[in-house]
Amino acid sequence: MDAQARPRRVGGEAAAVRHPASTLSFYLLWFVAGLLLCGLLTMRVLDNGYLADIGIDRWRTALVAASDASAFRELFAISFPPLALSTDLLAGLLPGTAGVPLPLLVNVLVGAAMAALWAGLLQGAGYGRFPAGLLALILLAQPSLQQAIAGGSGGPLGVLAFSLLVPAAIRMRHSGDVNAMALVGVALALMLFSSASGAYLVLALLPFMVVLAPPGLISRSPVGVLLVLLFPGCFTLLGYLYVNWIFGGSALAFAAGVDAVIRGAAANMGAHPWLLGGGHTLPGSLLVGALMALLGLPLLPAALGRVVDRQARFTLLMLALAVLAAIAIGSLTRYLDHPSRLLAYLVPLGVMALVAARPARLSAPVALLLALISLAGGWLVQGYQPAPVATAWRLALAGQPVAEAQTMDDAAFGRLLRDTHDIALDADVSGMLVPARGGADGLVLTSTDRLKADMIAGYISTAYVALQDPASPRGMRDRISRAFPTLWRDGPAGGTLVITQGNWRLWRMPDQSQAGRNGESGRGQVP
């Protein structure tokens, strides 16, 4: 008997030794699977011209910040969300990323990380290795998530941070684990600075943090609990506001522009049916948001109903209510173009509901069926009062070209400037120009002291100037066009019109040895 038992014991030890490698291969397998899923879907819509304005702005910001020290200082100080910019800059350091849309690269990697994380959680709960990974992929395929990944927003970063928060919140509710509380605090800070949707969800979560803290602990030391939970986010937020005040002249400089990311759809409400319909009032946003949540992810209520652990069920329910509260807040502040932007945060709750229910209460085949039904429901929900970007994404996924004329003009103009240097440009309103050009090297930006001084003095010292029609919507915000109102039309005295593309014009400035000052009449450099 001993002789027979000994090999089993040795085999058990060998299995234990192999376990880390087996676990690593499991995570790697589903990371690669998630990478393929997100990458192929993103490439599909990108080939048909889909890239949301937020993704273009994020890509351009990263390229500009990477090429100019003064631009980096200003952009990193007042750009929102700063975490997205940081990840884009890091991604830009990877070899072979020249010409690759950095926000999409980051989002695809984040999507792959979510697939691996969710698969690991489900496999740890008792779902088989293959069913766990398949469940993770189906949930990752939710259109709300895939649209955010392909659009280039920071939403996927926020969903990944929320995926870390949810299990930590359950552990915190169970035992008051200090490590879990600290992880919740860090996750809140990450969500706050990853995307505007994450910031709205953090705002909605604040009162729920008091409810989710262990009752005994919150009654004994409420200040201590809130300090652990909120200190990372509050400390980082105060530092961010201070830096905005230093470099932007106001603590709220990141929200000053009409097209600021934190403002969302507020600048163009008429183009978003949700804000004119269900999201127009508080009761409407809550009621319609709840119905869309139930229809778009029926797996969540079905799994919650099978959870025996009361603390886990309570935590998941409170977090789901916080998402609905965030939908209401985002709608009333006119940020939210469609609830699906925040409904994506319900997906990690669905994963943890399956983990809490376990296969004994909700078998893998039933869970897979519910995930597939949720996928169909997600498509249905996204088609209700859709935002223009969602409509464009669906058309691009169906194979229809959706590139806008202005984006194509920006890209064409940028490609023409690849071999031209010493160009004065307001990159903040340049759209796809900088990404299509391949970077901001050789551009003299409005963030540089040189061009700032030129605009004050009324004299452009660069070899070229690129500017937009001041009568166009973007041209009205082009700081060079505003400083020299007729330079786009008349050009500088003695200058040469080199390129015209859409609303763009590139003027070659006259020989600086013969140039004088830009006349206020807009003729440009005059003798």
Image: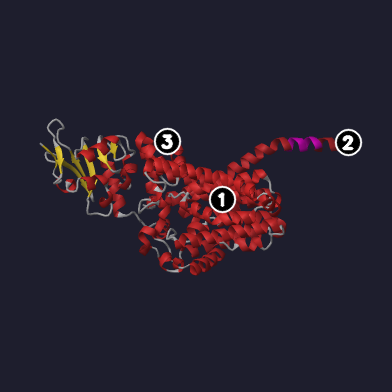
The kind of secondary structure element at disc 2 is helix
- First reached walking from the N terminus: tag 1 or tag 3: 3
Amino acid at dot 3: Gly
Residue 96 tag number: 3
Quarter that holds the C terminus: top left
Whether pointer 2 and pointer 1 mark residues with C-beta atoms closer than 8 Å, the reply is no
Q: Residue 79: where, in percent of width, then height?
A: 41, 45
Q: Give the CA separation, mark 1 to mark 3.
A: 30 Å
The kind of secondary structure element at disc 3 is loop
Circle 1 residue:
162
Amino acid at dot 1: Phe
Residue 16 tag number: none
Q: Residue 364: where, in percent of width, then height?
A: 66, 57
Q: Give the CA separation, mark 3 to mark 2.
A: 58 Å
Q: Which residues are magenta?
A: 9-15
Of residues 47 and 98, the one drawn nearer to the viewer in this rendering? 98
Mark 3, mark 2: which one is toward the viewer?
A: 3
Amino acid at dot 2: Asp
| Residue 12, magenta (yes or no) | yes
Circle 2 residue:
2
- First reached walking from the N terminus: tag 3 or tag 2: 2
| Residue 90, magenta (yes or no) | no
Whether pointer 3 and pointer 2 mark residues with C-beta atoms closer than 8 Å, the reply is no
Q: Residue furthest top?
A: 513
In the image, taking residue 211 as reference, residue 39 lies left or right, namely left
Q: Residue 253: where, in percent of width, then height?
A: 39, 47
Q: Is residue 101 visible?
A: no
